[in-house]
Image (cartoon, rainbow, N blue to C red):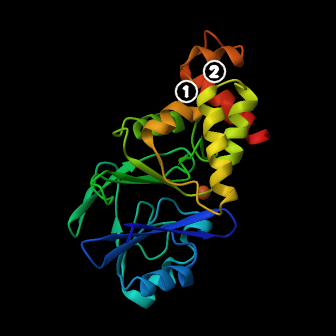
């Protein structure tokens, strides 16, 4: 049985259920309680914790019902805007969960209080997992809504510094569109061309475009490649800083 169950919801959201220590499980950004409860019961798991990356409704809508039905603990960073948080966390906090642990990485940008959760040994083969919410997507990043572009760029840079084999599970499936956008900027990039082909094949077969890895993202996520001459050149920003190139890319993606 895989450690992670991917539950698609609301058209393009991903909810995750992650098994640990035998029967324990945590859910990430459960916008829908019924599908999570079904997954838990099908796999005979016990939901102990819910991780919330940020306050948007399409990440939190199922939290209250899951807490009511299972008594699980709700972990999040923004108690003012997320109802029912039991454990308020911030940057650098480490939360032990069964035989593993969760490290909290503050990633302001999409919202002022967005966090990502890194579990260094959570996958079957002992690799790390990072739950990135709407901060990093496969091939992209979230809209910058409540912070400056610099904050988002710093947040993405923190995620990029995780071990390359870390599995990245993000909050939405915008993967195909993200690579299409990247190729609209640097059309002949072989790594991105290859990823888009792969992703389309996965989608055709009814699969999910998650997880990717931090290593893959560093090679093919154009938002992480803003220091590269090929990206700067394509935007006629050869002498600009990485942050300025990132900001220009993000603005273009908003209109894509
Ligand atoms: Fe969001």
Does residue 195 appear left or right of residue 49 in this picture?
right
In the rendered image, which quarter contains the C terminus?
top right
Front in this rendered view, residue 81 or 203: 203
Q: Is residue 13 above or below residue 61?
A: above
**Residue 57 image position (x, y, % from top left):** 61, 68
Q: Is residue 103 above or below residue 236?
A: below
- Specify whether residue 148 is in view: yes
In the rendered image, which quarter contains the N terminus?
bottom left
Instruction: Please tell me in which quadrant of the rendered image residue 204 appears.
Output: bottom right
Residue at point 63%, 20% (across, down) = 231
Front in this rendered view, residue 221 or 75: 221
- CA distance separating discs 1 and 2: 7 Å
Label 2: state its secondary structure: helix
Q: Which residue lies under the disc numbered 1? A: 225
Q: Which residue lies under the disc numbered 2? A: 231
Instruction: Please tell me in which quadrant of the rendered image residue 40 appears.
Output: bottom left
Residue at point 55%, 81% (across, down) = 35
What residue occupies the far top of the structure in this picture?
239
Question: Counting residues from the N terminus, which is met first, the one under dot 1 or under dot 2?
Answer: 1
What residue occupies the far right of the structure in this picture?
255
Does residue 22 appear left or right of residue 57 in this picture?
left
**Residue 72 image position (x, y, % from top left):** 36, 81
Residue at point 66%, 41% (across, down) = 196
What residue occupies the far left of the structure in this picture?
99
Q: Is residue 179 above or below residue 130?
A: above
Q: Quadrant of ligand 1?
A: bottom right
């Amino acid at each position: 049985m895989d450690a992670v169950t991917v539950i698609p919801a609301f058209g393009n959201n991903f909810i995750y259920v992650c098994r640990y220590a035998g029967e324990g499980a945590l859910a990430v950004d459960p916008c829908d309680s019924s599908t999570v409860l079904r997954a838990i019961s099908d796999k005979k798991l016990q939901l102990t914790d819910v991780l919330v990356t940020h306050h948007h409704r399409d990440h939190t809508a199922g939290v209250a019902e899951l807490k009511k039905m299972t008594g699980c603990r709700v972990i999040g960073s923004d108690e003012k805007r997320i109802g029912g948080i039991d454990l308020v966390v911030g940057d650098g906090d480490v939360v032990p969960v069964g035989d593993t642990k969760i490290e909290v990485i503050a990633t302001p940008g999409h919202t002022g209080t967005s966090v990502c959760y890194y579990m260094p040994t959570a996958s079957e083969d002992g690799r790390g997992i990072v739950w990135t919410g709407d901060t990093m997507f496969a091939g992209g990043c979230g809209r910058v809504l409540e912070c400056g572009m610099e904050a988002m760029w710093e947040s993405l840079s923190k995620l990029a510094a995780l071990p390359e084999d870390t599995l990245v599970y993000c909050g939405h499936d915008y993967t195909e569109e993200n690579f299409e956008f990247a190729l609209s900027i640097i059309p002949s990039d072989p790594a991105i061309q290859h990823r888009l082909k792969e992703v389309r094949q996965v989608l055709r077969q009814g699969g999910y475009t998650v997880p990717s890895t931090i290593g893959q993202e560093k090679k093919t996520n154009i938002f992480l490649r803003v220091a590269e001459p090929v990206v700067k050149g394509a935007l006629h920003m050869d002498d600009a800083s990485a942050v300025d190139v990132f900001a220009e890319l993000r603005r273009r993606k908003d209109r894509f």
